[in-house]
Amino acid sequence: MLSLQYQSETFRKDVSDLLRYIIRRLCLMVVLLFGVSVLVFLISHFVPSNPAAANLSQTALNDPEIVAAYEAKWGLDKPVWEQYIIYMKNILVNHDLGTSIRTGRPILDELKQYFPATLELSIFAMLIAIVLGVTFGVISAIFQNKPIDHIVRAVSVSGVSLPSFWFALLVMNLFCSVMNIFPSGNRYDARLFAPNGGTGLYVIDAISWNNWPLLSDVLAHLFLPALVLGFFTMGLITRQTRSNLLEVMSSDYIRTARSKGMKESRVVWRHALGNALVPVITVSGMGFCNLLGGMVFVEKIFSWPGIGQYAYLAAVNLDFPAICGVSLLIALTYVVVNLFIDILYGVIDPRIRYQ
C-alpha cells in the first residue's frame, strides 16, 4: 500500500515538473521568436536593395509617381521602426503575417500551401536517415576495425562531406536519365492525378482516400529527394551511434551481462542501444530542423514545390513579408522540435528529471 502511494506521489511530481518545464520553455519560445522577428526584419530591410526595382518593370521605374505609389502601398516609405511596429501589430492583433509583395497573396495562405510539401519530404528523409544511420552505426560498432566497419565509416563520411546539390544532380542523372527508374521532379504526375483537399501530405491523403495508384506515384516522386536529403543526416547519425555504442559496450553492466552468458545480439539491442540512442535523438532532431530550413537547392533541382523554393523566390524578389514569414516558421520549427526532443529524453531514459 505504501509502495503504491509512493509511486502515485512520484508520478504526480514528475507530471508537475514536466508541466512547469513545458510552460517555461513556451515562455522562452515567445521571447526567441520575438528576437528572430527583430533580427530578420532589420537585416532584410537594411541590406542595400530596392524592392521596387526587383518587382516593377523598367518603364514603371522611370515614372516617379508609380514608384512612390508602389512604396506607399507596401509601407516602404515609412521608417523601418514604424514598419516593424505595424508588422508586429498585424501579427498579434489580426494574426496576419502580411501580404506577399511578389504574388499579392496572404503570407499565411502561401505558407500553408508550400509547407506540407517540405514537411512530407523532411519526414521521409529523416525516416531514411534514422533507419540507415542507426543500422549502419550498430553494424560498425559490432564489427569494429573490420572491413565492414571501414566501408560503413567511408559511407558516413561521404554523407557528411558531399554537397547536397552535387549529390542530387548525380542521383537524378543516374536514376532518372540513365536508368529511367524514378520520375525526375515534382510531387506527382499531373497528367494522371490532381489531388484536391486533404492535409497536403499526399502520402497520408492517398492512404485515407484509398487511392493506391496515387500513393505509388507520390512515393516514386518522393524517394530520390528524400534519399538525397537524408544522406547527410544519415552520416551524422551513423557516426554518433557508432561512437556512443562503443562507449556503452565498454561499461561494467555490459560486461556483467556478457559474463552471465547472455547472447551478444540481446546485449546490444536490449541493453546497450537504448542508452546509446539518447545523444542520437539530439542529432536527429537538429537534422530534421536543418532539413526544413536548408533544402533550397534540393527542392530547386527536383522541382519540389516546398518552402525552400518559396524562400528562394522571396529572397530573389526582395519580398520582405515572405522572408520574415519563412524565417519565423523555421524558427518556430526549431523551438518545437527541440522541446519535443527534451520531453522524449525522459521517455527513453527514466533517470532524466525536469527541473
Image (cartoon, helix red, strand yellow):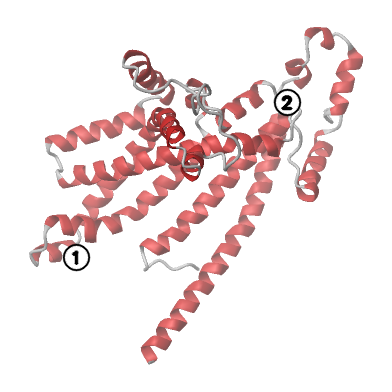
SS label for mark 2: loop
16 left or right, relative to 11: right
Q: Which mark is residue 253?
A: 1
Q: What's under tag 2, amino acid-wise?
A: Thr
Residue 244 or residue 99, whichever sits in front: 99
Q: Which mark is residue 103?
A: 2
The image quarter containing residue 220 is top left
Image marks 2 and 1: residues in contact by CB distance under 8 Å: no
* Residue 61, above or below 128: above
Residue 36 at x, y percent in the picture? 65, 43
| Residue drawn at x 74%, y 31% as measured from the top left | 105
**In which quadrant of the rendered image does the N terminus lie?**
bottom left
Q: Is residue 236 visible?
A: yes
* Residue 255, above or below 71: below
Residue 103 or residue 253, whichever sits in front: 103
Residue 120 at x, y percent in the picture? 49, 39
For disc 1, the neighbor class at 10 Å (few under 14, some 14 to 19, many from 20) is some
Q: What's under tag 1, amino acid-wise?
A: Tyr
Alpha-carbon span between mark 2 and mark 1: 62 Å
121 left or right, relative to 33: left
